[in-house]
Amino acid sequence: MISLADIQKKLRGSIAVDEPMSKYSWMKVGGPADFYIEPADKDDLVAIIEYFQSHNYSWIIIGRGSNILISDEGIRGAVISVEQALSKISIENNLVTAEAGLRLTKFVDFCIQNELAGVEMLAGIPGTVGGAVVMNAGTPDGETADYLVEVEIIRNSQIQRVKKENADFSYRHSGFDKDVILSASFKLPHGEKEELSEKRRQLILRRNKTQPLELPNLGSMFKNPPNTYAAKLIEQAGLKGKRAGNAQISEKHANFIVNLGGAKAEDVMKLIDLAKRTVYQNSGIMLDLEVRLVGFGNSAKEKE
């Protein structure tokens, strides 16, 4: 069994014990993690992952907590945040390399300031570059993988570089579910700064108008099935505004579940189950979750 003292000997960054994960979730739910770790830099991150792997200790990586639902029981094992350790971005000959913990808002702004197009559709998504790569985040205007060239990862305890064509990208999916993203490189086309800024502004305005951003949420709960929209199916099933405890299927956008104040992960799960069951009964379509469920198996798993 690994102790706090054992980890502190290997870590230059910070560590907290029994840390409430609700502090790090955009849904504002989630019980405590045994250890919450913020490595000092990339080398510190790689070293602590190697240590946990060599001792067969459970751990997961998180970015900004904007796409994970954490159980009320919390997470047995370590939660490693990469926001501090992996936040650099650079450019060389229109090839932008962004580390995994960099916020998407900063990534998009950097590209626009350098007159590079193709990622402005990510504006307003409250995640990190690493999270966007893993789930191939996007909108009807484009996906993260569109201009991606290469991803630097930890796989099988080794740092590797994977070309886009070997990454198994598809709608809201990549082949990196079991890996740790370190950085991603994008070859972006030229764009006019003013046009890109205006496009970003319009996208954010549209997002603010159509999504319940005034309340804690995890964004789209379900992937859109082929040729239709999850929100449309949920609304047609009569579920807009349905509540479980202090969680609610948003009245503004049916594919969002919001925390009205003091909701539990259990409440959110009840609404997830209700939506899946009712939509299937109503349409014959089984909704597939877009958010990650963490801690519901009573232990952390690598890249759960």
Image (cartoon, rainbow, N blue to C red):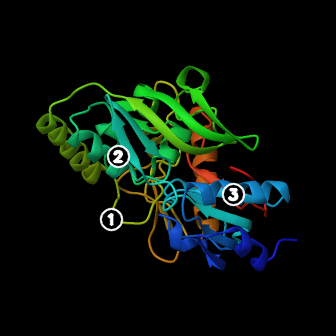
Examine the rendered structure and indicate whether residue 163 appears above or below residue 54.
above
The residue carrying pointer 2 sits among few (fewer than 14), some (14 to 19) or many (20 or more) residues within 10 Å by Cα, namely many
Task: For mark 3, give the secondary structure.
Answer: helix
Residue 301: x and y in percent read 75, 54
Is residue 100 found left or right of 193 in the rendered image?
right
Residue holding disc 3: 47
Residue 227: x and y in percent read 46, 24
Residue holding disc 1: 214
Q: Nearer the viewer, mark 3 or mark 1?
A: 3
Q: Are marks 2 and 3 in contact (CB under 8 Å)?
A: no
Most foreground residue, 85 or 92:
92
Q: Earlier in the sequence, mark 2 or mark 1?
A: 2
Most foreground residue, 146 or 289:
146
Q: Nearer the viewer, mark 2 or mark 3?
A: 3
Q: Which quadrant of the structure image shows residue 263?
A: bottom right
Is residue 189 found left or right of 164 in the rendered image?
left
Q: Residue 107 bears which disc, if any?
A: 2
Residue 140 visible somewhere in the drawing: no
Q: Are marks 3 and 1 in contact (CB under 8 Å)?
A: no
Q: Report, in whole angstroms, how far the alpha carbon at label 2 lies from the one at label 1.
A: 23 Å
Q: Which quadrant of the structure image shows residue 43?
A: bottom right
**Residue visible at 46% across and 30% down in the picture:** 145
Q: Looking at the picture, which amino acid does disc 2 mark?
A: Phe
Q: Looking at the picture, which amino acid does disc 3 mark?
A: Ala
